[in-house]
Amino acid sequence: MIPISDCMKCKVISIRQDATLREAVSIVVENKVGTLPVIDAGGKLVGVVKLRDLLSLVMPNFINFIDHFEFVHSFGALDLRKPSKAELNRKVSEIMEEPVYAEETFSLMHAAAILHKNGLKDLPVINKEGDLIGLASHVDIGTALMRSWLIVNGDSAEKK
């Protein structure tokens, strides 16, 4: 068994639950991340803010009801919409989702199953105390699973 802790990113960009949405937007834009784990003052994972949560601040409600909107060639002015100052000053805790996570000892397959079941791209990793210690993407997990495919009977598959 390969634990998720063997393939996770240890440098995790996170945000405190008392931060503003303006701060969350700034972190997402500066670091180009789509999943922002939310922690309390003690570093415990308490939630997650996703890129789509932030984008929903300006998306019209009807977008969620349209299965196929490829027929619309341009949403025009919607590209230029911005949240109000009041919205950006709201606390992260107001829009964060309950966290879905893996414990550091979970196997890669267990973590992959959690990602798949929940339709996630990134999975926060916690230790037994509940502290956020890493983040594993679907790419991290998938490539870690495939790494063993390259070794056959102690030889690299490339040599065969």
Image (cartoon, grey):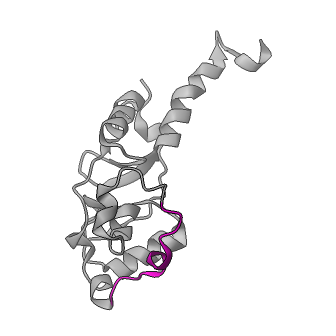
Q: Nearer the viewer, residue 156 or 60?
A: 60
Q: Is residue 148 above or below residue 65?
A: above
Query: What's the magenta region?
Result: 72-84
- Name the quadrant containing residue 16: bottom left
Which residue is depicted at the point 30% across and 64% down? 62
Q: Is residue 140 above or below residue 39?
A: above
Q: Locate the N terminus by quadrant.
A: top left
| Dominant secondary structure of the residues highlighted in magenta in the image | loop
Q: Left or right of 156: which side holds 141?
A: left
Which residue is depicted at the point 24% across and 68% down? 95
Q: Where is residue 128 drawn, in percent x and y?
A: 25, 45
Q: Left or right of 101: which side holds 146?
A: right
Q: Where is residue 28 drawn, in percent x and y?
A: 46, 69
Q: Where is residue 142 drawn, in percent x and y?
A: 51, 34
Q: Report if residue 83 lies within the magenta region.
A: yes
Q: Locate the C terminus by quadrant.
A: top right
Q: Where is residue 73 drawn, in percent x and y?
A: 53, 63
Q: Is residue 97 above or below residue 3?
A: below
Which residue is depicted at the point 53% across and 73% down? 30
Q: Residue extending furthest right? A: 159
Say if residue 44 shows up in the picture.
no
Q: Residue extending furthest bottom? A: 85
Disc count in the image? 0
Say if residue 64 shows up in the picture.
yes
